[in-house]
Image: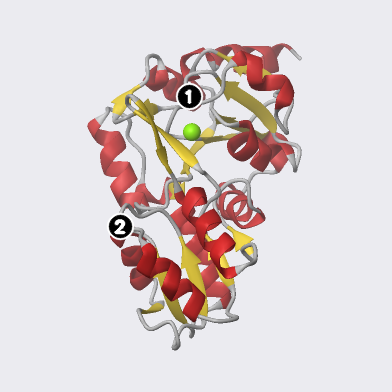
Amino acid sequence: MSFSAAIVDLDGTVYRGGELLPGAARGVAALREAGLDVLFFSNNPTKDGATYAADLAELGIEISPDRVYSAGAATTRYLGEHHADDALLVIGSEGLKAQLREAGLALTTDPEAAEALVVSWTDGFDYNDLQAALDTGEVPFYGTDPDRVVPTADGRMPGSGAIVDAVAATIGHEPDAIFGKPSAVARRLVLDRLEASPEECLVVGDRLDTDLLLGDRVGMTTVLVLSGVTDRAAIGDGPVDPDHVLAGLGEVETVLEGAGRE
Ligand SMILES: [Mg+2]
């Protein structure tokens, strides 16, 4: 098997807390030198592709904005396909709201006018948001991504999943869909862009339940890096048995070399 594309996670895989991880730039270069089409996918829903591309350029990794995807892009795509003319009540960051407005979607702050409820990370989340969610009544309820905690430079912080869970507990039912990795919406987004079959794709990330599960479900080769939230002891307990386990992205060449010998 030789590979033609790689879907690479960002936080905990390429960088952590805004700092490039050791060897990450070398790993990206190795993928490109081996002829792989590299696409980044983050479950952080607050930024668009252009912002990610600018952040990566600062760290010395050049990528076109249309090759960086996020839970924000997956959410925007789904809502554009299914709620193009609906008023959306959004509990989320200004960055997410900007992406939705940019795509021509309509946002409302009036729960009674809302035709769908979209829940995501925001550090402004409070009691009034729970009241607003309750007041939307029986409208479709979506989460941008499932991550309950996300790694920071010196620890962890609550993510979208924590807020989605709080809203779900308040309104009394689970979301109708959660976008971002490992959702089918996220997978379709990247496979459409890559024009590669899943068998030709590497999926690289630090989480078994999101990054690797996205690809494992459709036969991609999974590569776990131990530079983020997962340690070696947790591997047996996860939903995916990774095809390769690396200390970091800098070692990805070993996976490519192995592929060449088969
Ligand atoms: Mg990660």
Dot 1, crowdedness within 10 Å: few (<14), some or many (≥20)?
A: many
Residue at 56% x, 74% y is 81
Residue 39 can be seen in this image: yes
Q: Position of residue 119 (x, y in %)?
A: 47, 62
Dot 2, crowdedness within 10 Å: few (<14), some or many (≥20)?
A: few
Q: Is residue 87 above or below residue 152?
A: below
**Mark 2 highlights which residue?**
124
> Taking 128 as reference, is 178 left or right?
right
Which is nearer the eye, 193 or 150?
A: 150
**Mark 1 highlights which residue?**
228
Residue at 44% x, 88% y is 113
Alpha carbon distance from label 1 to label 2: 26 Å
Residue at 46% x, 15% y is 250
Q: Is residue 34 above or below residue 94?
A: above
Identity, as a three-letter code, of the amino acid under mark 2: Gly
In this rendering, the label closer to the viewer, 1 or 2: 2
Quadrant of the rendered image containing residue 112: bottom left
- In this view, the residue farthest toward the left is 58
Identity, as a three-letter code, of the amino acid under mark 1: Gly
Q: Position of residue 217 (x, y in %)?
A: 75, 42
Q: Is the CB atom of the residue marked by disc 1 within 8 angstroms of ligand 1's nearest atom?
A: yes
User: Which mark is first along the chain, 2 or 1?
Assistant: 2
Which is nearer the eye, 258 or 92?
A: 92
Q: Position of residue 188 (x, y in %)?
A: 63, 55
Q: Position of residue 142 (x, y in %)?
A: 55, 65
- In this view, the residue farthest toward the bottom is 113
Helix, strand or loop at label 1? It is: loop
> Taking 111 as reference, is 182 left or right?
right
Q: Is residue 64 above or below residue 95?
A: above
Q: Is residue 228 above or below residue 219?
A: above
